[in-house]
Image: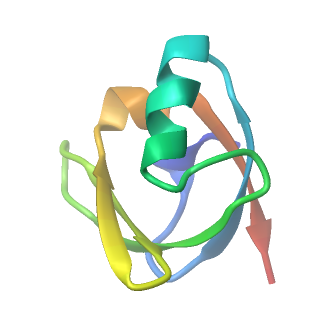
Amino acid sequence: MTLDKAKIGQRIVIKNILDDNIRVQAIRLGLYEGAKVSCSAKIPFGPIILGNRLQEIAIGRELAKKIKVDVIN
């Protein structure tokens, strides 16, 4: 599934970032393939808020559609 489909509270692992330019920018934020993060919040029609260690990162909805993730239980 893609990141925009994640539900609040789910722990997810990033599987693939489809765009090379986005991949480079995401690495700077600590988001890389294999990174484990949690979905902290979803703003209706807005960004997805991810918790990554002690920081929160807002990812735009359109960008989130380009990031493939798996849910961790």
Residue 61 visible in the current orientation = yes
Task: Kindly identify the residue that appears in the image at 70 percent across and 60 percent down.
Answer: 35
Query: Quadrant of the image for the C terminus?
Result: bottom right
* Residue in front for this viewpoint, 59 or 43: 59
For residue 72, above or below residue 50: below
* Residue in front for this viewpoint, 6 or 32: 32
In the picture as drawn, the residue positioned furthest to the front comes out as 28
Task: Kindly identify the residue that appears in the image at 48 percent across and 39 percent down.
Answer: 26
Name the spot of residue 44 as percent of width and height, x first: 19, 53
Name the spot of residue 3 as percent of width and height, x first: 55, 47
Task: Kindly identify the residue that appears in the image at 39 percent across and 85 percent down.
Answer: 54
In the picture as drawn, the residue positioned furthest to the top comes out as 20
Would residue 48 appear left or right of 17 to someone viewing this image? left
Task: Kindly identify the residue that appears in the image at 62 percent across and 40 percent down.
Answer: 2
- Colour scheme: rainbow
* Residue in front for this viewpoint, 46 or 56: 56
Query: Quadrant of the image for the N terminus?
Result: top right
For residue 32, above or below residue 72: above
Name the spot of residue 20 as percent of width and height, x first: 61, 14
The quadrant holding residue 23 is top right
For residue 56, above or below residue 57: below
Residue 41 visible in the current orientation = no
Would residue 1 appear left or right of 60 to someone viewing this image? right
Name the spot of residue 67 as percent of width and height, x first: 59, 35
Count of numbered circles on the image: 0
